[in-house]
Image (cartoon, coloured by chain):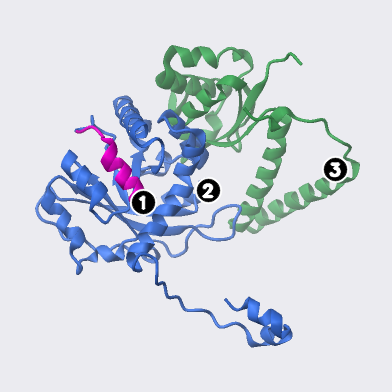
Chain colours: A green, B blue
């Protein structure tokens, strides 16, 4: 099949300041990633990872700080090795120190979504252990129960899925 | 305290063991080697790694910055507090000391300077001897994150090391002082690709090589790992009787 293959990097933006989460937006993330690429690899790096530029950030969740970046399969190593060099995000004139923690690399958006669902479930369980309020505890327990019930329903109606190309190795 | 948040961040990123580093620089007036801080003093309860049920393990490490051959005598002294540290690392500043560290000294790690141009070139014979003895070379990555000139020194020094040692026996560690300077294990393995390591070497640099260093440090405490005594917990009596006699013999270790 003749089609362009991509790699999707699922990253979490980790910051100390809780206010930083509200300033995460698409432009801040792209400028930070491009800045790191430029500093590490120069013009070559900027060019390699800007081919699919208009669709770079595919998913952004400001509450949890999760970002999904896309790049070509041949150059994903370049982008991945430049991501640790990001030290802060800038938006609307404010600088917030943070870093990118890569959670998963997948070949399709669906595989990244599956991983993200499992990851969020694990995070909910951890939050349950560390919550202080009774109301918080009850709301987290309710959402946990809700997602386990939904998982049981999904397994009943699941048909065979088509193959993802994320199983392909270089 | 920011130190406890460092350990929390480590556990959150997925690291299962953290080493606290004490650096001793002999250039200043003679310093006594202090006793290592035991981890239970720092934190009342260790943070738990997400995904596993165990808390993180904290080990202690000593780094000696040596610029003179007389500083190495500390390692041979039997009465000092050196025995209490789990890992011992040395940071040689001259070529002669690098040679001595690779061939004679009883250390686990040799640190490679990343903040300045290398004062000496690596040669193959001492590096190969160090690899045979099971000594690892350490590259730091936090200066590379902070500053552009440091990044150039880090990459050039790391590249020359990897060219000589062919990617074996290298570990990458962070000298992080704040939780924001840490990076996750997969990201660090990718930084290893920047330093010239192959993909499997880079992953080993973050996982298997570090475990090997811990074991190497343990052999120093226990006569080269030949004799190691450990108290065996007494098995519960009722469980033993329910098993038939032939199986009972096999379960006793």
Using the image as rendered, state which of residue A38 and residue B215 is in the foreground: B215
**Which label belongs to residue A154?**
3
**Which residues make up the magenta segment?**
B120-134
- Residue designated by label 1: B134
Q: Is residue B163 above or below residue B97?
A: above
Please indicate, yes or no, whether residue A69 appears anywhere in the rendered image.
yes
Please indicate, yes or no, whether residue A19 appears anywhere in the rendered image.
no
Q: Is the C-beta separation of discs 3 and 2 under 8 Å?
A: no
Quarter location, residue B176: top left
Magenta segment includes A93: no
Q: Chain of mark 1?
A: B
- Image location (x, y in percent) of residue B199: 51, 34
**Which label belongs to residue B14?**
2
What residue appears at the point 64 percent right and 17 percent down from the top-left corner? A55
> Tag 1: Cα neighbours inside 10 Å, few (<14), some, or many (≥20)?
some
- Image location (x, y in percent) of residue B197: 44, 33
What residue appears at the point 19 percent right and 33 percent down from the top-left corner? B119
């Amino acid at each position: 099949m003749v089609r362009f293959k991509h790699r999707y990097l699922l990253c979490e933006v980790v910051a100390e300041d809780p206010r930083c989460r509200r300033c995460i937006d698409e432009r801040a993330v792209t400028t930070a990633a491009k800045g790191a690429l430029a500093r590490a690899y120069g013009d070559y790096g900027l060019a390699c990872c800007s081919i699919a530029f208009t669709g770079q950030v595919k998913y952004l969740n400001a509450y949890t700080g999760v970002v999904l970046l896309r790049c070509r399969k041949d150059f994903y190593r370049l982008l991945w090795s430049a991501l640790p060099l990001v030290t802060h995000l800038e938006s609307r004139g404010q600088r917030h120190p943070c870093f990118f923690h890569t959670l998963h690399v997948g070949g399709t958006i669906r595989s990244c979504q599956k991983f993200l669902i499992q990851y969020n479930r694990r995070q909910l369980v951890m939050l349950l252990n560390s919550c202080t309020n009774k109301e918080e505890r009850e709301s987290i327990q309710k959402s946990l129960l809700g997602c386990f019930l939904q998982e049981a329903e999904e397994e009943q109606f699941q048909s065979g899925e088509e193959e993802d190309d994320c199983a392909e190795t270089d | 305290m920011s130190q406890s948040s460092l350990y929390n961040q480590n556990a959150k990123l997925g690291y299962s063991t953290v080493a606290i580093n004490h650096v001793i620089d002999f250039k200043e007036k003679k310093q006594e080697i202090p006793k290592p801080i035991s981890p239970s003093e720092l934190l009342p309860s260790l943070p738990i790694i997400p995904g596993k049920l165990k808390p993180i393990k904290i080990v202690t490490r000593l780094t000696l910055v040596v610029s003179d051959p007389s500083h190495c005598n500390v390692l041979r002294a039997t009465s000092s507090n050196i025995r209490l540290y789990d890992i011992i690392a040395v940071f040689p500043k001259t070529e002669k000391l690098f040679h001595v560290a690779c061939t004679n000294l009883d250390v686990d790690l040799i640190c490679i300077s990343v903040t300045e141009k290398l004062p000496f070139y690596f040669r193959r014979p001492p590096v190969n001897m160090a690899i045979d003895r099971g000594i690892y070379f350490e590259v730091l990555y936090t200066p590379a994150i902070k500053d552009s000139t440091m990044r150039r020194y880090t990459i050039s020094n790391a590249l020359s090391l990897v060219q000589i040692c062919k990617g074996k026996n290298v570990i990458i560690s962070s000298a992080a002082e704040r939780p924001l300077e840490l990076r996750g294990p997969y990201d660090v393995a990718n930084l290893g690709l920047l330093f010239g390591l192959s993909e499997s070497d880079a992953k080993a640099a973050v996982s298997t090589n570090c475990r090997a260093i811990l074991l190497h440090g343990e052999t120093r405490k226990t006569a080269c790992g030949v004799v190691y005594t450990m108290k065996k917990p007494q098995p519960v009596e009722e469980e033993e009787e329910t098993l038939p006699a032939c199986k009972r013999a096999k379960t006793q270790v």
